[in-house]
Image (spheres, helix red, strand yellow):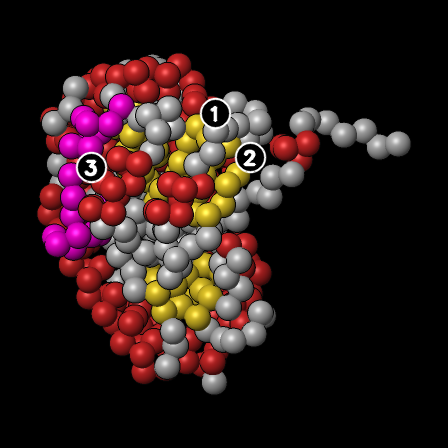
Amino acid sequence: MSQHYGPSYVRAIAPYQAGKPISEVAREFGLDEAKIVKLASNENPFGLPASAATAMAAAAADLGRYPDANAFDLKSALAARYDVPMSWITLGNGSNDILEIAAHAFVEKGQAIVYAQYSFAVYALATQGVGARAIVVPAKHYGHDLDAMAAAIDADTRLVFIANPNNPTGTFVSAPEIEAFLRKVPASVIVVLDEAYNEFLSPEQQYESTAWVKQYPNLIVSRTFSKAYGLAGLRVGFAIAQPEATDLMNRIRQPFNVNSLAQAAAIAALNDQAFLAKGAANNRAGYAQLVAAFEELGLEYVPSSGNFVLVKVGADEGAGARVNLALLKQGVIVRPVGNYGLPQWLRISIGLPDENAAFIAALKKALA
Ligand SMILES: *Cc1c(COP(=O)(O)O)cnc(C)c1O
């Protein structure tokens, strides 16, 4: 008889599938790294902001010491920006860490977590990681059906994950819809509102989620420096919640989960409004560029409020994998989403104009 280690709910976890690194694709397909275009992980096409690089160079002198476990400077900057006390902030090693911390802090084995079909893959991982039961609510037009999600909350439910905008579909739920949802959720259930792509919302879509945090002690708003701020490789995210929820999360959090370089870079990026504005403008233009190509090619896509677009590249179950392989051979890395139950679709991160153009040219060849 073979020996099994660990709980069955850990053995049942399907590991997270990350976007392929450029070096790996170069090796696998015999391509020149410099010519590869990666539009697979919703990273900032401008890369690390120069302001953050400068801040890290200065912080490097102190790397022999542990980071500030309470991240005073970064928390002060965030508290000022979002008009909340520092005691309302939890830092994460990326916001993935926040999602895991929330599951560990508020849910125990056998209890339940609610999230939507086609929502971020880490919700399933966080749920399985604590041995909780997943209540997966069918999507509406590829996005969150908040009425159905509120109705799905049962006596065992302790947490709900909502991504707004959602990844991988790019769908958006409006402020009035979220407010109506928050009013319905029992006070005993934590709501994690994951706003990883908030900075890409149009002015008409923007809303003040921290105002809701002040009203709802069960609401946790999660943000990241990985996308609009261009710090994906450094791993910094944060949560804003009232002190009781924040205190519990900080007990679960590893004391030094955000390193010194990341803290310094995040402060610089937070204050770099010019970098954010440049990214937002590029994103708008790139979205128009991609969508125009999809329309020309007669491809269905899901209107996106993020920095990526989900596009249907064929009618058969093998379409996503087939077109993805054809793109890889041409040195273009995008994200297949078969693991999300979307085998006919690909998710394309919005890049610089010439990267988008390279993808479009490769897609035309792949479909020909
Ligand atoms: C990218 C992403 C995150 C953030 O990941 P980090 O760990 O902060 O890099 C969180 N939620 C969603 C929905 C995402 O797509």
Q: Residues in magenta?
A: 198-217
Q: Which mark is residue 107?
A: 1
Extreme bottom residue here? 368
| Cα–Cα span, label 2 and label 1 | 10 Å
Mark 2 is surrounded, within 10 Å at the Cα level, by few (under 14), some (14 to 19) or many (20 or more) other residues, namely: many
Label 3 sits on a secondary structure element that is: helix
Q: Which mark is residue 141?
A: none
Label 2 sits on a secondary structure element that is: strand
Marks 3, 2: nearer the viewer: 2
- In primary-sequence order, the first of circles 2 and 1 is 1
- In primary-sequence order, the first of circles 3 and 1 is 1
Amino acid found under the numbered disc labelled 2: Arg
Q: Quadrant of residue 218?
A: top left
| Cα–Cα span, label 3 and label 2 | 28 Å
Q: Are marks 3 and 1 in contact (CB under 8 Å)?
A: no
Q: In the figure, 342 relative to 90: above or below?
A: below
Q: Which mark is residue 133?
A: 2
Is residue 23 shown to the viewer in this render?
A: no
Extreme right residue here? 1
Q: In the figure, 30 relative to 79: above or below?
A: below
Q: Is mark 1 within 8 Å of ligand 1?
A: no
| Cα–Cα span, label 3 and label 1 | 23 Å
At horizontal 26% and vertical 35% (from top left) the residue drawn is: 183
Amino acid found under the numbered disc labelled 1: Val
Q: Which residue is mark 3?
A: 209
How far across and down, in percent of the image, does residue 24 sit?
Answer: 52, 54
Amino acid found under the numbered disc labelled 3: Ser
How far across and down, in percent of the image, does residue 227 sit?
Answer: 29, 46
At horizontal 44% and vertical 28% (from top left) the residue drawn is: 158
